[in-house]
Structure formats: C-alpha cells, structure tokens
Amino acid sequence: MLLHIIRTGPFARPTVDTPASSSSPFATLPLGQLARDLPGSTAVFRRHRLDFCCGGNITLEAAAHERQLDVAAIERELSELNPQAPSDTPTDPDALIDLIVRRFHDVHRRELPELITLATKVERVHKDHADVPAGLAALLQSMLDELQGHMQKEEQILFPMMRRNPGGVLTPPIERMRAEHDEHGRMLQRVQDLTHELTLPADACNTWRALYAGVAKFTTDFMQHVHTENNVLFPQFEERA
C-alpha cells in the first residue's frame, strides 16, 4: 500500500544529531522524523512507497516490514545522504505557514479541478476499456471538496492562531487537523487502488497519460504537504511528552 494509515498519538520529536553511518539506528526511528531531519530521505521513501506523512510516526523497520522490504538496504540508501545538506523547508512558523499556503494549498486548488476534468473525459471516452478508472472523477471531486474545507479551516482559524501565539499549545485543533489528514490519506489510497497504482494500459491515450502524470504529481505534493504540517509545523504547537 502506498499510504499505510496508522496514528497512535502526537508525533514525537527526537532529532537526528549524528552523522549517518552503517551503525546508525535508522530502523528504529519514525519515518516522519527522518523525513524532517535527514535531507533527501523523502525521495528514498517515495521510491520505496513508504508513507512518511500520514504514517510518519511508524518506524522505518515497521513500515518496511509492512511492505516486505529490505530495511537494511533502505538504511544503506539513507546512510549515503548528507545530513548537513541545506533544507529548503524553513522551521520558523510564519515562514512555514506562508510556504504551505503558497506551495500546497494554492497548488491543490489550481490543479485538482483540471485532474477532475481529465478523469471525467477518460471515463467517458474509454468507458468500455477493461482498465478504465471508473469513479475516479467522483473520488477526486470528493477529495477536492474535503481539502477545500480543511484548508479553509487552517487558513482562517488554525494558522492565525499560530501566528498570534508563537510557542503556544494548540493541541486540540491540531489533533482535528491530523485526523482529517488521515482521512485524506485514506482517500488518496483509494485513488491508488482504483488506478492500480497509476498503471497505464499499453494503449492509453494522451489524455489518460496526462491524467495519471497529474495524479502522480498531486500524490507527491500531498505527501510533502502533510509531512510539512504533521512533522515540522504542528509539533511546535503541541504539548511535549
């Protein structure tokens, strides 16, 4: 599964403060922590289809076991990354919020309607094709509707609260946003299932190819979006264990 949706509590925030090596305890660290603290790790996780956003509190070892992957091989890939490489994700809350709205919220609002249009056309033109993703347009529309409400709550309520209360504890509303992220993740998993993980038939037309390419980009953007909120922004406003 692309998105293994499990959450057991607020994301813990230990840090990766030693250089990566063959003896580094990557296997015992949560995916979300590694995604936040080890530059380049998200590309490794995407390559192995490991969910570092909604399932970011799961350890690398547990996630690899779930997908029957070689955890030692993934650790070797992570050990080759440079932990001192500069990150393009800020940590300051104001800058993070600006980035989230500009890089993710605005992009989802602009791109999802076009994906719905493409899906509608593919389903209509290829309705008799064995591999047609029947129901994809409706599912994407549901995702857009849910995301619109979610992003509006963040932009009009949660984010202003964060700007007014730097360092404050806002656990209850954040828990609600985390729960909605999980639901969005489940919907995205249904998109993957419906499209057989974006597998194109050999005779796919250009519209079908454009649709799956767009959904692939949206999937990458969504995972980075939720990771940035769940693992970088939200922990700054939650109670520490």
Image (spheres, grey):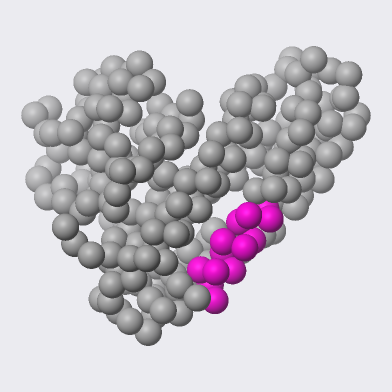
Residue 208: x and y in percent read 77, 31
User: Which secondary structure is most common in the magenta stretch?
Assistant: helix
Q: For residue 43, what is the image quadrant?
A: top left
Residue bounds of the magenta highlight: 144-156
211 vs 90: above or below:
above
Q: What residue is shown at x 44% (from left), y 59% (from top)?
A: 176
When the figure is inspected, residue 221 is found, relative to residue 4, above or below; the finding is: below
The residue lying furthest to the bottom in this view is 164
The residue shown at (66%, 27%) is 194
Q: Position of residue 21 (x, y in %)?
A: 12, 33
Q: Is residue 156 left or right of residue 112?
A: left
Residue sitting at 25 percent across and 35 percent down? 59
Horizontal side of 35 relative to 142 (left or right) equals left
Quadrant in the rendering for residue 137: top right
Using the image, determine if residue 172 lies above or below residue 68: below
The one nearer the camera, 172 or 162, is 172
Decide whether residue 24 is among the magenta residues.
Answer: no
Q: Is residue 27 visible?
A: yes
